[in-house]
Image: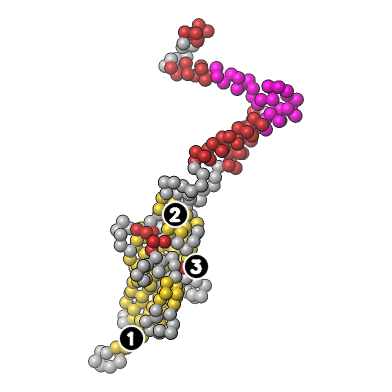
Amino acid sequence: MAKFLMNVVVISFTILIPTFSKANLCQNVSPCVCIFNQTAQINIDSLIAKNGFIDDSTELQQNTTTYYFHGCTDGDFKNPYNSQSNFTASLIRCDTFVTPINKAKDSLFNGTCEAIGKANEIRYALVEGQSNHYKIVYDNQKINSSLPSIQLVCVDSQDTSLKISNHGANELLLYSPAVCVKYSTLPEGLSFGTIFCLIFFISSIIYFVGGGLILYFARGARGIEVIPNYDFWTSLPGLIKDGTIYILGGCRPFTVSTAETYDRI
């Protein structure tokens, strides 16, 4: 009987203990936020550029590739090469082509821009081969090459900068204190103490009520006999008293030997 009730308690603990997010797994909540558990999250909401886009350029021979990043929201971008083709996007790529037009080294600048990432396409993922470094990926199915991504690099300085890692694969690096994992001292939802109390009281109810019903119907117990392990609970105060005396007596095995010893204490 006691073994059965113990199994019931163990099963109830297993069911009631909350299942927290797996280590290193950041669940997407919105384009700006992903959460690890109740106390940790990545929130790039403060990256929203107030004065426009964050940008960086790379030069290859005479051509230049520039990326413009507007955080986790879409921003209005004016195409410098075609005023009739403006964009509203979170990530934009512009390629500038320089063409010499005479021997005097005069050049003609031309280029193209395209929106390669919308805010609603953002998801958070682990960087390949890393256990605690994250990136935002744009699930842009219109791009035939690899999906655009920006690795989030946490820094102590207050400056935010965008760097190109691989322009061929549209891979960028974003250095900013705003991309660091943030911890909250006041977790949302139930606290650990509340969860522990719930587990304790529900387990107690299952133990006493469930055990009492089994004893009542299966064994025909009546009165105080329906209390599970009644003898143990009635002897518990004495066991606690013996343990206390044993500890206070220096853990000597013969400290308590007679009833008179109890009376003296």
Whole-number angstrom distance, CA of label 3 to CA of label 2? 19 Å
Residue lying at 49% horizontally and 42% vertically, measured from the top left:
191
Closer to the eye: label 2 or 1: 2
Whole-number angstrom distance, CA of label 2 to CA of label 1? 44 Å
Q: Main secondary structure of the magenta part?
A: helix
Q: Which residue is mark 2?
A: 41
Magenta-highlighted residues: 210-238
| Residue at the extreme front | 50
Label placed on residue 109: 1
Q: Which residue is mark 3?
A: 120
Can you see residue 7?
A: no
| Residue at the extreme bottom | 102
Q: Quadrant of residue 201?
A: top right
Where does residue 231 sit, x and y in percent of width and height? 63, 20
Left or right of 106 in this view: 139: right
Label placed on residue 126: none
The amino acid on which the numbered mark 2 sits, given as a three-letter code, is: Gln
